[in-house]
Amino acid sequence: MVGYVDNKEVLLKRLRRAEGQVRGIHRMIEEDTYCIDVLTQVSAATKALESVALALLDDHLSHCVAEASREGGPVADEKLREASAAIARLVRS
C-alpha cells in the first residue's frame, strides 16, 4: 500500500488544478499574452506541483519510511536513502 492512499483525492484535485493551469499557460502562449502574465501563471503552476510533491514526501516519510524504520536493517537504510535523494531533487528543482 502506498503512503498517500489516505490523501489520494486531495492530491488528484491539486493535480487537476495544476493541469488546468498548464493548459491555461498553453492558451496564453497561443494568444500572445504579455510575458509577465505568462510567467506569473508558470509560477502558480510550479507552486501547485511543489505542493503535490511536498504532500507526497510527507506521506512517504510518515508511512513508508516510518514503517521501514520500525523494521530496521537494510530496508530502513534504503528507504532513508530514497527519501534523502527525493528531498535533494526537490531542493535542486
Image: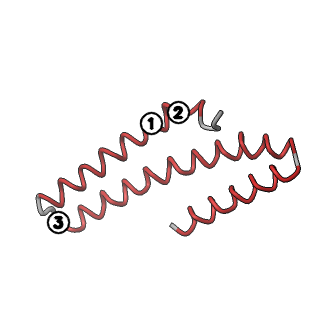
| Residue 36, image x, y percentages | 24, 67
> Tag 1: Cα neighbours inside 10 Å, few (<14), some, or many (≥20)?
few
The three-letter code of the residue at mark 1 reads Leu
Disc 3, SS: loop
86, above or below 21, in the image: below
Q: Position of residue 79 (x, y in %)?
A: 74, 52
Q: Residue sitting at 43 percent across and 41 percent down? A: 14
61 lies left or right of 86? right
Residue 80 is drawn in which quadrant? Answer: bottom right
Q: Earlier in the sequence, mark 3 or mark 2?
A: 2
Q: Position of residue 81 (x, y in %)?
A: 73, 60
Residue carrying label 3: 34
Rounded to the nearest angstrom, the CA distance separating label 3 from label 1 is: 30 Å
Secondary structure at badge 1 equals helix
Examine the image and state in which quarter residue 68 appears.
top right
Q: Is residue 81 left or right of residue 13?
A: right
Which residue is the site of mark 2? 8
Q: Are marks 2 and 1 in contact (CB under 8 Å)?
A: yes
Which residue is under mark 1?
A: 12
C-alpha span from label 2 to label 1: 6 Å
Q: Which amino acid, by three-letter code, is at mark 3?
A: Tyr
Figure quadrant of residue 43: bottom left
Please tell me whether mark 3 or mark 2 is closer to you in this view.
Answer: 2
Question: Tag 2's secondary structure?
Answer: helix
Mark closer to the chain start, 3 or 1: 1
Q: Tell me the residue at 62%/49% (across/down).
A: 57
Q: Is residue 74 left or right of residue 91?
A: right
Circle 2: residue type: Lys
